[in-house]
Amino acid sequence: MDNSMNEKSHRSLIEHTGGKSLEEVNGSIEVPKNASFWRRLFAFSGPGALVAVGYMDPGNWVTSIAGGAGYHYLLLSIILISSLIAMLLQYMAGKLGIVKQEDLAQATGNRTNKFGRYALWIMTELALIATDIAEVVGGAIALSLLFGWPLLVTVFLTAFDVIILLLLMKFGFRKIEAIVMTLIVTILVVFVYLTILSKPDWAAVLGNYVPRPQTMSLKAAEGLDNPLFLTAGIIGATVMPHNLYLHSSISQTRQVNHDNPEELKEAVRLMTWDSNIQLTLAFFINSMLLIVGAALFFGHAQELSGFHQLYDALNDKNIAGAIASPVLSTLFAVALLASGQNSTITGTLTGEIIMEGFLHFRIPMWLRRVITRGIAITPVLIIAIIYGGNEAQMDALIESTQVFLSIALPFSMAPLIYFTSSKKIMGPYANSAWVKWAGWLSFVALTAINVFLVWNMFAG
């Protein structure tokens, strides 16, 4: 009897899958057939917002603001290049999902041997945990700043975000997209306001979007992170590995007649528009993070060792100048909390996608979230206990996770570029020559940066 109950319990928690990606929402959103371009684009808009969330999570805040405070506007070119690479890769990911009706995890798992499948799954899970650590830290610090609660308490509170997500899932996927977009607009409005008030040198801003050789040859200023470390961190925080899996899945939430070549082609086109519009918003937000860091805090980089210091600096006239006020610091904390909650939604969805795709089984969302968040919370709690809530250590942890994401990125890029460039797999929808070679050039460049970074870390 006990064995029978155990088997029943096992079946209820672990469900073997082999069907559609995120089956409960796959093809659930209708697209008007004979409507105007803008109405059809509106119907397709949403997945791009969920993807863009990963490009403005709390990990971006630390690396971008630190880059501006330490090296002025110089690293803006890195944000631009990273955003262009992101647009290229997300186009490939969305196209793979629509054309093949497979997400990247399914495509990889179905075309690699058992060892490769499990190795890539482990790497992807670690990247997801690294992303979750940044969300834990950002959300916990935001709650601490807004309500004055001890950091140890707010770290524990971030574990209960699974309740919020489970409630949201009951409203339907379109409602989740709307909530995420609202939070993105909130972050955008806050930083547009902060950027305008900070009065940056716009000539220097525009000039530094052009890549310069000295960007990669800078020596670390005294007491500051090595610029190559920040460069890898910005890339890791901007081009997120888990977003490639997410986009290849949620691009399938729209109803598309795959037997109609014109409709399929139109679906790919609308997905590309949606993705690029949302990623352009993410690019502006990431740029404004660095611009605010450069305009307000350049020369004070060593004083801004954490989110709390940034919060205080926005209320300190000696640092932020005449614009300093409690309102600014509160808006900063609100935007930080919105960023963390957004990333929580997409991170949980991605966890389900990669488990189903690589391992062909899934577990209940609440259990999946408890496991992932539990693993992510552990190192944060350890640091909070050992260092007594020292947020400088928390920010160092976030920067390390972003560098790990940069290192993990090529392991997701290579399969994606290979699959979408193969005529055997994609048929007439295979990448054009320039898209394929731009993808492989990005792969080689990022891999070279990562090898150099790891070598320097061990050497130094």
Image: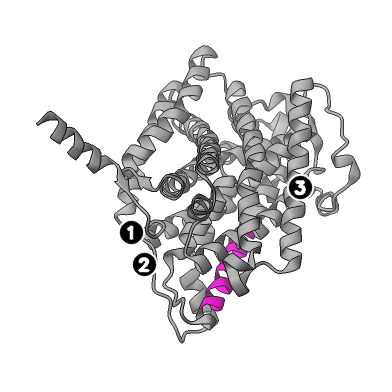
Q: If the image is split into quadrants, where does the N terminus sit?
A: top left
- Sequence-wise, the earlier of marks 3 and 2 is 2
Q: Residue 368's spot in the image, x, y percent?
A: 37, 39
Residue carrying label 1: 24
Q: Which residue is drawn at 56% across and 71% down?
A: 268
Q: What stretch is highlighted in magenta?
A: 264-280
Q: Which residue is drawn at 54% across and 49% down?
A: 112
Q: Which residue is drawn at 56% across and 36% down?
A: 326
Q: If the image is split into quadrants, where does the C terminus sit?
A: top right
Whole-number angstrom distance, CA of label 3 to CA of label 1: 37 Å
Task: Answer yes or no: is residue 256 visible.
Answer: yes
Whole-number angstrom distance, CA of label 1 to CA of label 2: 8 Å
Horizontal arrangement in the rendering, residue 338 relative to residue 232 (left or right): left
Check disc 3 and give the amino acid type.
Val
Instruction: Name above or below for residue 148 compared with residue 356.
Output: above
Check disc 1 and give the amino acid type.
Glu
Which mark is drawn over residue 51?
none
Its colouring scheme is one colour
> SS at mark 1?
loop
Residue 392, by quadrant, is top right
Residue carrying label 3: 444
> SS at mark 2?
loop
Instruction: Name above or below for residue 215 compared with residue 263.
Output: above
Q: Residue 47's spot in the image, x, y percent?
A: 49, 61
Q: Residue at x 63, y 68 (%)?
A: 423
Task: Answer yes or no: is residue 225 visible.
Answer: no
